[in-house]
Amino acid sequence: KNQVEQSPQSLIILEGKNCTLQCNYTVSPFSNLRWYKQDTGRGPVSLTIMTFSENTKSNGRYTATLDADTKQSSLHITASQLSDSASYICVVSVGNDYKLSFGAGTTVTVRA
Amino acid sequence: DSGVTQTPKHLITATGQRVTLRCSPRSGDLSVYWYQQSLDQGLQFLIQYYNGEERAKGNILERFSAQQFPDLHSELNLSSLELGDSALYFCASSVQGLNYGYTFGSGTRLTVV
């Protein structure tokens, strides 16, 4: 069964600090892995997308890493801002790209 | 604006009723996907259409149906509504077969009372 597990379920950090979110997957065959940011009540917005051959990808203060051997990915948020408060969802694409496996998300709360 | 347009943004209806949610994909995108997100839950894939044809089905109830029209917009029909159908319904679009350009709309919030 294709599964995507994210940890932690939620975390609280102080403004200006860094944090790292984890994503482990058992999806096969792997196509690509995406990280999305979802503000409460809004649609998910893509942050990064990585294929099998990519190890890291950055989007501003967001840096995603991928280890296809261990089937792990992380999303690092640098110098967090209040606007980073959101749910971060790891999504793994299976095979032909129209089947996506979604993680349950990590809820990040940034406090002043 | 993501380019994926969903209407209406909010919908309140009574149990047993039927509603239609509409999605217009980004210009050039042939695939439309529908997702359901219940309170504090992850996104659940419902169904995908590609260029007017059903391509993949997820956890979609028999009371729900969808279609994609020649102009590529899609409608999700929810009938015999139950309280548990209250959720955010998202539409996403992509160019089939590519690893990029998978974009979500802002969603329709359905409340069944």
Image (cartoon, coloured by chain):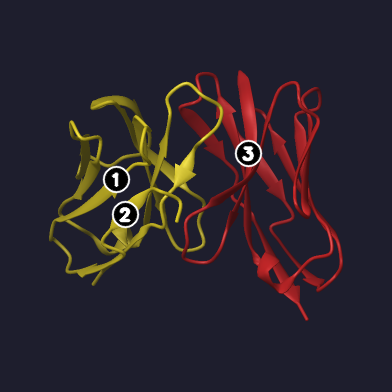
**Which residue sits at x=31%, y=40%?**
B60
Residue B102: image location, x then y, percent: 49, 37
Q: Are marks 1 and 2 in contact (CB under 8 Å)?
A: yes
Badge 1 density bin: few <14, some 14–19, many ≥20, Cα 10 Å: many
Q: Chain of mark 2?
A: B
Provide the residue designation for mark 1.
B24
Q: Amino acid at mark 1?
A: Ser
The chain under label 3 reads: A
Q: Type of residue at label 3?
A: Arg
Residue B96 image point, x, y percent: 42, 24
Closest to the camera, between mark 3 and mark 1, is 1
Instruction: State the count of labels.
Output: 3
Helix or strand or loop: what does disc 3 sit on? Answer: strand
Answer left or right for A46 relative to B3: right
Chain holding disc 1? B
In this rendering, would B39 be left or right of B5? right
Say what amino acid the circle numbered 2 marks: Gln
Q: Which chain is yellow?
A: B
Mark toward the viewer: 3 or 2: 2
Dot label at residue A34: 3
Tell me where residue A34 sits by quadrant.
Answer: top right
